[in-house]
Every structure is written in C-alpha cells, then in structure tokens.
Amino acid sequence: MISLFSPVFYVDECLNGIKECLQKGWTGPGEKMAEFEEKWAEYTGYPYTVFLNSATAGLELSFKSMKELYGWQDNDEIITTPLTFVSTNHAILSAGLNAVFADVNDTLCLDPESVKDKITKRTKAVIFVGIGGNSGDLEEIAELCRKSGLKLLVDAAHMSGTKIKGIHMEELVDIAIYSFQSTKVLSTADAGMVCCNDKEIAKKIRIKAWVGMDKTRTPWSDDNTQRWYFDVVDLGGSYFGNDIMASIALAQFAHLDSDVKMRHEIADKYFQNLKECDRIKYIRVPQNCYSAQWLFQIVVPERDALIAFLESRDIYAGLHYLDNTQYRLYHYARETCPNADFYSKNAVSLPFHLRLTDEDIKMVSESVIEFYGEEKC
Ligand SMILES: Cc1ncc(COP(=O)(O)O)c(C=O)c1O
C-alpha cells in the first residue's frame, strides 16, 4: 500500500524531550512551549508567537481577537478562498463575520484580481491560504491590502518551511497561523501556532486560549505576581498547546529545512517520471516562492476515475480541497468561483511523504501513465 501521507518522526529526539517532561512532572504549557515559541519567532521573523492545540484554534482566536480589538462589527466581511480546509472559513463565521469568497488562480491560491472585485465598504480583512506550501500571489495581495487599509491573515497550515525569497512573511502579513497537525510538514500529533506583529492581539489570544484568565500558571506569563488572584477578563476556552507537543515540535523543527529539501527531491522525481504525459498540468509556483511542498498536486481529466484506479492498485491519492461553496453551510456562494470549482473537480494530490522510495514513486507514476494510456500521454 502506498499512502497519501506517512509522517516521519525523529523518534529518539522526540522521546528525549517527552521523557524530560515526564521526569520533571510537567506536561502542560511550560518551558518547552516557551522554547518552541521563541524558536518559531526567530525562524519566521514575527515578534509574537502563541503555541496552541491546533491551527483551527489559532484561526478562530485570531478572528475573534481582531474583531474585538479593531472594533469590527457583526457581519463585517472577510475575503477568503473556497479552496481550503473548512477550518479557515468556519473561523470567520464563528467570530460573527461574513465569509466572502473570491476565486483562486493557477496557483490554487487567491487570485488578486478576484480579491479586488470583492472589496466593499464592509471588508475588514483578507485571509490567504498557501495551498501545499505555495505562497502564490501573496505579494500582490499584500500590496492590495495595504492600499485598501485591510488586514491580511495567512492560513499557513501547509507553509512550515515555505520561504518567500528575500521577504519575511511578517513584512507582508499581519497574522500567520501554522498547523503542526500529524500529517503536516512539521508533524506533532496536534498543534498550531499564531504568529503576529501586534502585541495586543498576541496577548488577547493568550488570554482567550486559557478561559479568559489574565494570568496563567506558567513561567513565561507577563505578570506572575500573586497569580492566584487572577481575573477573568474575556470569554475564552481551553486552546493552549502543551509541553509534550512542544517537545515533539522542537525535535521535528531541527529537521524542518532538510525535510523540505527532501520533499523537493521527491517532487523532482515525480516531475521527471511524468514529464512525457501531457494530459497532466501542474500548479504554478511563482519564482519568488520556495514552497514547503506539503503536497504534490497535478491537474488531470477524469480525476475521480484516476483516484479509483490508483486505489485498485493500493495507491491512495487525495483531494485538496473540495470547493467549500459546495458544502451546505456555504451554499450561499455556490457557482461564484469557477476556477475553484474547476480545480476542485480536476486536481489530485499524489502520495507524498518522506517514506516514499524511488520504487514507490515509479509505481505511482507508472500507474498514472497507465490510466491515461501511453498513447494518450
Ligand atoms: C488549510 C488548512 N487550514 C487549517 C487546518 C486546520 O489545522 P489543524 O488540524 O491544526 O486544526 C488545516 C488542516 O488540515 C488545513 O489544511
């Protein structure tokens, strides 16, 4: 069987960190988490980072915090993409804001022209999703947001390790939310990180992440004096990450850049094997983007039949993503984004992870070519 994902864990390094936590008797949010937040801030260039139990939590807390601090009203509009995991769009709705869908382009990410068309007096922000690690036309969208006075968020769930050459994302983007969920480029079991430039937003997210308490029982709290007299200043939930996940994240982080390099090598092998097949189209990755390459996606005719054919060979492909406007909750925007609809029907993610052998890659490639018939390729 060749699976879509199969994360590699640096087991001994992960276990060393976990063991330290267990021996110390502290598995909650603590020093490991603080260490990872600091390292991630240094890596991404953002001054403020908050480690949470998922990117979903990070997205929700970001929108809620921005709405409250920046005085956004109910039903103010956030421009978003239909081609994403639903967490991106649920976060907008859960903050009482309206999700307004713009279309994607050949990068599978938001199309700047379509974003421009969707701006109204009620628009407050744009959320960009870097599909598969691609930063698409983010620079143009950042420029548009700057000129239009809009905040820019990036759902960077797939972008751990993405580099926009010469530019730190923090220069372009107000808030970036990363996922360290089990299958992601930097895998833990479940965790996420919010990175931002605004200290007040970071503080609000921290408070909301622990049931709204203004002091937390952790060594890194701003104010540790008389911490038993905490106040509850906000509505919140239980969204913090913990030192077990942070230990895994720290161990995995040490290998992130070399893992991404290996991902590129695997992608190159696919490109090489499939190059004769002109039924296959690829996703545009702009010159300035060094993608984290979470996915290897191709655009093909008869996509569903191809997935079924591969499954008959015990090869498991995937779909990233179904156009969200096809879900009942987002039906109100159906048929407004033809490109998203097209890619939702024609893009497929081939098995892609660091355990793939050359034989596996060859087998997947040959099966794709066989499906279309050599003469059609
Ligand atoms: C684009 C995107 N956003 C958000 C998420 C949610 O991430 P998490 O599982 O860390 O909540 C995912 C997870 O797959 C995702 O792919």
Image: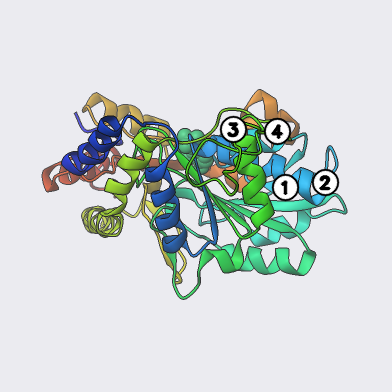
Disc on the earlier residue, 4 or 1? 1
Of the numbered discs 2 and 4, the one sitting upstream in the chain is 2
Q: Amino acid at mark 4?
A: Asp
Q: Earlier in the sequence, mark 3 or mark 4?
A: 3
Tag shown at residue 210: 3
Q: Is residue 320 visible?
A: no
- Secondary structure, mark 2, is loop
Q: Position of residue 71 (x, y in %)?
A: 83, 48
Label 2 Cα crowd, 10 Å radius (few <14 / some 14-19 / many 20+): some
| Marks 2 and 3, the one that precedes in the sequence | 2
What amino acid type is highlighted by mark number 2?
A: Trp
**Label 2–label 4 contact, CB within 8 A:** no
If you read the primary sequence from the N terminus, does the residue marked by circle 1 or circle 2 appear first? 1
State the residue at coordinates (48%, 49%). Answer: 131
Residue type highlighted by circle 1? Met
Residue at image position (50%, 69%) is 168
From the image, tell me which residue sits under label 4. 231
Q: Is residue 256 left or right of residue 116?
A: left
Q: Which residue is mark 2?
A: 72
Q: Alpha carbon of mark 2 to alpha carbon of mark 4: how far?
A: 25 Å
In the structure shown, which secondary structural element does the residue marked by tag 1 occupy?
A: helix
